[in-house]
Image (cartoon, rainbow, N blue to C red):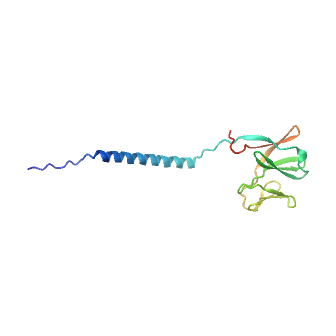
Amino acid sequence: MEESAPSEITAGSRRDFIANVVLGTGTVLGLGSLAYRFLEYLYPVIPAIKLVEVPAGKPEDIPADGVRLIQLPAGPVILEKADNEVHAFSAVCTHLGCTVQWHPEDKRFICPCHQGIYDLKGNVVSGPPPRPLQKLQVTLRDGQLFVLMNSPKGEQA
């Protein structure tokens, strides 16, 4: 009796085929999800920043050659008057986001959390803050000061 040689190409069972399809699909979906997250990390979606003009009081409210810290809906702001010119800075420390405090005896802004120190123009004097306080645009209209700043959190353009 002659034995027939087994065929070199053997057909797999239906169970093997389905298992390979499921594993292949899972691998493709997993790698695709990983690639999506990686590209999302490299190219993040940055929401548009909406600028709003916020009323900040009258120039007479700021002492001559002095500073006033005010709370606006868009965040705390420092108004500084020197030589009849008003300048504005964000009162948020650039280190960890604390509100800086004005110390008139030293003529400096000091962050109470980590002792970051800023001068009268918002520049870093010492401490951990990586950059100066953010300068804000101030306009005077009809005897009222307006500060141009980012919209409050949650509001987008």
Residue furthest to the top? 142
* Position of residue 100 measured from the top left corner of the image (x, y, whole percent): 78, 56
* Position of residue 32 measured from the top left corner of the image (x, y, whole percent): 47, 46
Of residues 4 and 99, the one drawn nearer to the viewer in this rendering: 99
Which residue is drawn at the image coordinates 22% and 49% (left, top)?
8
Could you say which quadrant of the image residue 25 lies in?
top left
Could you say which quadrant of the image residue 115 lies in?
bottom right
Which residue is drawn at the image coordinates 31% and 46% (left, top)?
15
Of residues 85 and 90, the one drawn nearer to the viewer in this rendering: 90
Q: Is residue 71 left or right of residue 3?
A: right
The quarter of the rendered structure image containing the C terminus is top right
Of residues 18 and 110, the one drawn nearer to the viewer in this rendering: 18
* Position of residue 3 measured from the top left corner of the image (x, y, whole percent): 12, 50
> How many numbered circles are shown?
0
Which residue is drawn at the image coordinates 49% and 49% (left, top)?
34
Q: Is residue 10 left or right of residue 104?
A: left
Of residues 151 and 134, the one drawn nearer to the viewer in this rendering: 151
* Position of residue 77 measured from the top left corner of the image (x, y, whole percent): 79, 49
Q: Is residue 143 left or right of residue 124?
A: right
Q: Is residue 53 left or right of residue 38?
A: right
